Image: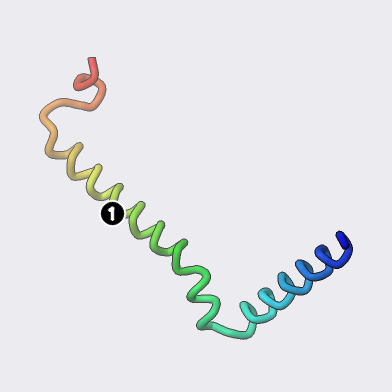
């Protein structure tokens, strides 16, 4: 039973790798969350830079 499950999972993984290599649309769909995360990270860093540059005091003085 375990051998069947392992074999089935290996076939599924190999099938997904094959589709990923052949289909640019599938590749875009699977990698879209990564690019969304990177875009949000850049937006957060820009917002943080703006907040720091408009602040009157450096961050280390605000906390203490």
Q: Is residue 15 left or right of residue 32?
A: right
Q: In this view, does 42 lie to the left or right of 59?
A: right
- Residue situated in front as seen by the camera: 28 or 13: 13
Quadrant position of residue 23: bottom right
- Residue situated in front as seen by the camera: 59 or 14: 14
The residue lying at 28 percent from left, 54 percent from top is: 43
Q: Is residue 1 left or right of residue 14?
A: right
Q: In which quarter of the image is the C terminus?
A: top left
Instruction: Return the x and y of residue 39 as percentages of the image width and height.
Output: 35, 60
- Residue situated in front as seen by the camera: 36 or 13: 13
Q: Is residue 26 left or right of residue 6?
A: left
Instruction: Return the x and y of residue 4 as percentages of the image width and height.
Output: 86, 67
Quadrant position of residue 20: bottom right
Instruction: Return the x and y of residue 45 as percentages of the image width and height.
Output: 30, 47
Mark 1 residue crowding within 10 angstroms, few (<14) / some (14–19) / many (20+): few
Residue to which mark 1 is pinned:
43
Q: In this view, does 45 lie above or below 29?
A: above
Q: Residue furthest front?
A: 1
């Amino acid at each position: 039973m375990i051998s069947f499950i392992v074999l089935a999972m290996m076939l599924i993984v190999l099938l997904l790798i094959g589709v990923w290599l052949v289909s640019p649309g599938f590749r875009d769909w699977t990698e879209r969350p990564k690019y969304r995360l990177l875009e949000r990270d850049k937006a957060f860093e820009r917002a943080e830079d703006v907040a720091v540059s408009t602040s009157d005091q450096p961050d280390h003085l605000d906390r203490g």
